Image (tube, rainbow, N blue to C red):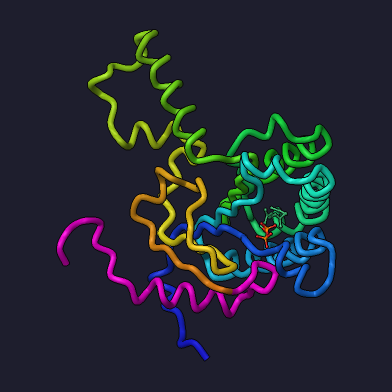
Amino acid sequence: MPGEIDLSRLPEHIAIIMDGNGRWAQKRGLPRVIGHKAGMEAIRKTVKYCSDIGIKILTVFAFSTENWKRPRDEVNYLMNLLTEYMRKEVGTLHHNGVKIKILGEPDMLPAQTRAEIQEAVILTEHNRGLQFNIALNYGGRAEILKACKKLVRCINDGSIDIDSVDEAMFSNLLYTGNDPDPDLIIRTSGEQRISNFLLWQGAYSELMFTDRLWPDFDEKELRSAILEYQSRDRRFGALK
Ligand code: FPP
């Protein structure tokens, strides 16, 4: 039984690479997509738990720019799941003060999915509880490149002076805007990679890897990740 987490020293921003849905299903002799369905349940519970204990921001990696390479049926299933999640959950999320934000390029998503997402974002935009960032058609390198292009355009049109550019200004141009960087990045399923997720923002994040497959991730697992985080010595390059 893990000890008690210190609610006064919670990570402000937790980010999760939700990996292992396919393997979870295959281990049970089920089609991969059933793993995604179970993964959606794990998201629901994680959002609830983070919201209940007072985490400020939760970011999940729901669909990467590389995930389009999966079989068309799987991509369609994921898009339908997202649509369903938005439709079914938005009321409860809104009621609990959750604010939904999308990181990435939703333009390429099916119109129906985009519409549900847009509605959920607009409905919840003034909420002050947990900010739930969903990385969708997201890639960290593409995000940095896009910010660079914006910056160069502003420098060229004279609205930004190149000598005034600093890290804070650059951060603001990313999808995350002025969100604080993730304090903790968790990846499930035993893989130990960052996979193009929050490359800039994760510069000083504590990394946590668990063998648990995403659909099996639960409150207990999150509590032990937070406990582990609270036992780490974050120095940001300085001495203690
Ligand atoms: C990784 O498992 C998981 C994904 C690529 C998709 C996660 C997305 C959802 C659960 C959809 C719903 C999202 C929201 C925000 C409601 P994998 O398929 O790569 O697993 P594997 O490595 O075992 O094959």
Residue placed at 75% from the left, 73% from the top?
A: 27
Please give the count of numbered marks on the rendered protein.
0
Give the camera-side residue of 192 and 230. Answer: 192
Residue placed at 64% from the left, 55% from the top?
A: 97
In the rendered structure, the answer to whether residue 107 lies left or right of residue 149 reads right
Give the camera-side residue of 201 and 93. Answer: 201
Percent position of residue 37, x then y: 79, 61
Percent position of residue 98, x then y: 63, 54
Q: Is residue 126 above or below residue 225?
A: above
Q: Quadrant of residue 231?
A: bottom left
Question: Is residue 166 a member of the stretch shown in magenta?
Answer: no
In the rendered structure, the answer to whether residue 12 lies left or right of residue 116 reads left
Percent position of residue 106, x then y: 68, 34
Give the camera-side residue of 151 and 127. Answer: 151
Percent position of residue 136, x then y: 64, 43
Q: Quadrant of residue 111?
A: top right
Image quadrant of ligand 1 equals: bottom right
Q: Quadrant of residue 44?
A: bottom right
Q: Is residue 180 above or below residue 162?
A: below
Which residue lies most toward the top here?
A: 157
Which residue lies most toward the left here?
A: 239
| Numbered range of the magenta stretch | 212-240
Residue placed at 43% from the left, 68% from the top?
A: 10
Residue placed at 80% from the left, 74% from the top?
A: 28
Question: Is residue 224 a member of the stretch shown in magenta?
Answer: yes
Give the camera-side residue of 9 and 94. Answer: 9
Q: Quadrant of the C terminus?
A: bottom left
